[in-house]
Image: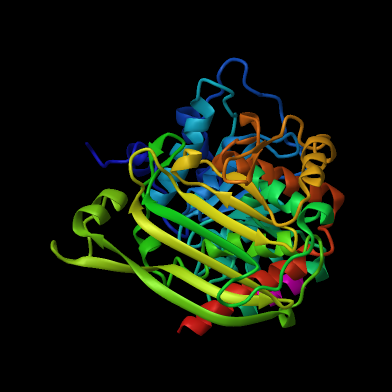
């Protein structure tokens, strides 16, 4: 199989000279690329969206999440994406991904792309100011600097996690939020896991005292809330094998196992235990944190990156991708852990486990073989409140989530039955969180608790990283 990217002939034929490219030249190449991979099919949206409220600029899209945002279209968003990036495989992968969405048979998108490449891509984005919202998903070590540059130049920010990967970055993050507040700009990170239905229902039931009671305080050995996830370096995205950039395995750039995927889990701890309540960094006490490696052999590295490994055959690359932290949040003990394997066994996938321990019930999410590797919520009652649980699920929550049900198992636990229409999958969550951002953009503000809780979230992850050192 050839490793030559689809866009290679186009990009090489129309390669722009770095630092001296004119806007006209960029437009000519963008028009050619659009003709090649973004031609609308019959029935696609073709009306002029130049007056849309939001114009997106995509900066240095080095992670596949940058493309997933555009798997759907939004009425409020201009159909032209202005891309500023260095030339290379990451840009080509991003273009191919969006071209695939434009050319798919079912519900195709109609994105137009205008591209600027060159070493001064950040400066050119600021100079042109072609959009009012910057999307950034890529190298995590420099992401906060991109964010600061955008905010300092009056551009709103919609950023993939993690925003920062170390305590030094956290100090810059606080400055970024201060600038956003001063300039009345919307700065938000992409928390897709809030839209997973099993997590939503876990949160809903935890807020019903008749079922859950109150959250336990827990202990270091038996936390009140636990969030664990298992991920894989080799996977399929939008039906194609995911090619990871080489820097993904450099924790100085990508971040370690305590500051990357853990961002989602720490966010869920806050979102579920203290729903819609503003938190403070003083509420966090880091107790323990640990980093452990996942080892890749020569063949595995070569397959997932399509590059020659930077080590000899017979050796391995140890990636500090696994992290576990134990901490308290306002006195409630929480445990968060992330594990990475190379590839999931046949028929399996990334998995999530969670438990919230209440005074009347435990709310447990499992995603193993018994659940066909789909997240399922179970309720273990600690008192005789079956009637209250039935009312909560079959009556109280039916208005928000029609069709959910309840089954009592032989184990004594209750399984929350959820129609398949709610299980849209990880990729679809990007459209859901983007629609949420658009709602906040139109309103001109975030909920009062979002910014302080984003600060607390990244304080927690970076404190765990510092503790593990």
Task: Say whether residue 418 is left or right of residue 184.
Answer: left
Region of the chain picked out in magenta, as a range: 173-179
User: How many numbered dots are placed on residues in this image?
Assistant: 0
Q: Is residue 86 visible?
A: no
User: Measured along the vertical axis of the image, is residue 155 above or below residue 386?
Assistant: below
Seen in the image, is 61 located left or right of residue 50? Answer: left
Residue 221 location in percent, x, y?
55, 75
- Where on the picture, by quarter, is residue 363? bottom right
Chief secondary structure of the magenta span? Answer: helix
Residue sitting nearer the eye, 302 or 98: 302
Q: Is residue 61 above or below residue 265?
A: above
Q: Is residue 177 magenta?
A: yes
Q: Residue at x 58, y 57 (%)?
A: 354
Residue at 42%, 74% (x, y): give it.
Answer: 291
State the scheme by which the image is colored. Answer: rainbow
Residue 178 seen in render: yes
Q: Which quadrant of the view contains residue 292? A: bottom left
Please state the horizontal and vertical placement of residue 217, each as a whole percent of the image.
71, 73
Residue at 35 percent of width and 36 percent of height: 6
* Image quadrant where one finds the N terminus: top left
Tell me the quarter of the image containing the C terminus: bottom left
Q: Position of residue 412 (x, y in %)?
A: 62, 46
Foreground residue, 340 or 362? 362
Between 407 and 117, the one nearer to me in the picture? 407
Q: Nearer the viewer, residue 269 or 202?
A: 202
The quarter of the picture where residue 174 lies is bottom right
Going 82% across and 71% down the picture, which residue do you hit? 182
Compared with 414, 459 (above or below) is: below
């Amino acid at each position: 199989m050839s490793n030559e990217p689809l866009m290679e002939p186009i990009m090489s034929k129309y390669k722009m000279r770095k630092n001296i490219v004119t806007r006209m030249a960029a437009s000519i190449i963008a028009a050619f690329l659009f003709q090649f991979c973004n031609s609308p099919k019959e029935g696609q949206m073709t009306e002029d969206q130049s007056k849309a409220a939001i114009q997106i600029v995509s900066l240095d899209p080095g992670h596949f999440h940058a493309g997933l945002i555009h798997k759907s279209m939004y009425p409020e968003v201009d159909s032209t994406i202005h891309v500023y990036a260095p030339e290379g495989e990451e840009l080509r992968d991003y273009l191919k991904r969006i071209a695939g969405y434009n050319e798919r048979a079912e519900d195709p998108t109609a994105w137009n792309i205008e591209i600027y490449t060159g070493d001064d891509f950040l400066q050119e984005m600021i100079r042109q100011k072609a959009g009012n919202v910057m999307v950034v998903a890529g190298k995590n070590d420099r992401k906060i600097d991109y964010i600061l540059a955008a905010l300092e130049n009056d551009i709103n920010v919609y950023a993939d996690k993690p925003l920062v990967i170390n305590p030094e970055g956290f100090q810059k993050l606080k400055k970024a939020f201060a600038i956003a507040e001063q300039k009345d700009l919307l700065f938000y990170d992409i928390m897709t896991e809030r839209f997973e239905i099993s997590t939503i229902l876990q949160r809903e039931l935890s807020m019903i005292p008749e079922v859950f009671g109150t959250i336990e305080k827990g202990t270091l050995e038996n936390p009140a809330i636990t969030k664990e996830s298992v991920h894989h370096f080799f996977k399929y995205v939008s039906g194609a094998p995911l090619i990871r950039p080489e820097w993904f395995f450099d924790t100085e750039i990508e971040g370690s196992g305590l500051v990357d995927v853990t961002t989602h889990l720490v966010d869920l701890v806050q979102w579920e235990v203290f729903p819609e309540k503003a938190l403070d960094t003083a509420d966090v006490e880091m107790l323990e944190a640990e980093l452990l490696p996942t080892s890749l052999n020569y063949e595995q590295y070569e397959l997932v990156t399509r590059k020659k490994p930077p080590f000899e055959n017979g050796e391995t690359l140890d990636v500090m991708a696994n992290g576990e932290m134990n901490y308290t949040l306002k006195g409630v003990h929480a445990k968060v852990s992330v594990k990475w394997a190379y590839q999931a066994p046949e028929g399996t996938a990334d998995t999530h486990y969670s438990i919230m321990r209440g005074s009347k019930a435990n709310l447990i999410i499992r995603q193993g073989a018994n659940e066909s590797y789909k997240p399922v919520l179970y309720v273990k009652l600690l008192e005789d409140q079956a009637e209250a649980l039935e009312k909560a699920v079959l009556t109280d929550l039916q208005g928000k989530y029609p069709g959910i049900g309840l089954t009592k198992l032989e184990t004594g636990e209750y399984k929350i039955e959820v129609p398949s229409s709610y299980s849209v999958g990880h990729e679809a969550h990007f459209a859901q969180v983007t629609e949420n951002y658009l709602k906040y953009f139109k309103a001109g503000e975030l909920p009062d608790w979002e910014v302080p809780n984003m600060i607390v979230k990244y304080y927690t992850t970076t404190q765990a990283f510092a503790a593990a050192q």
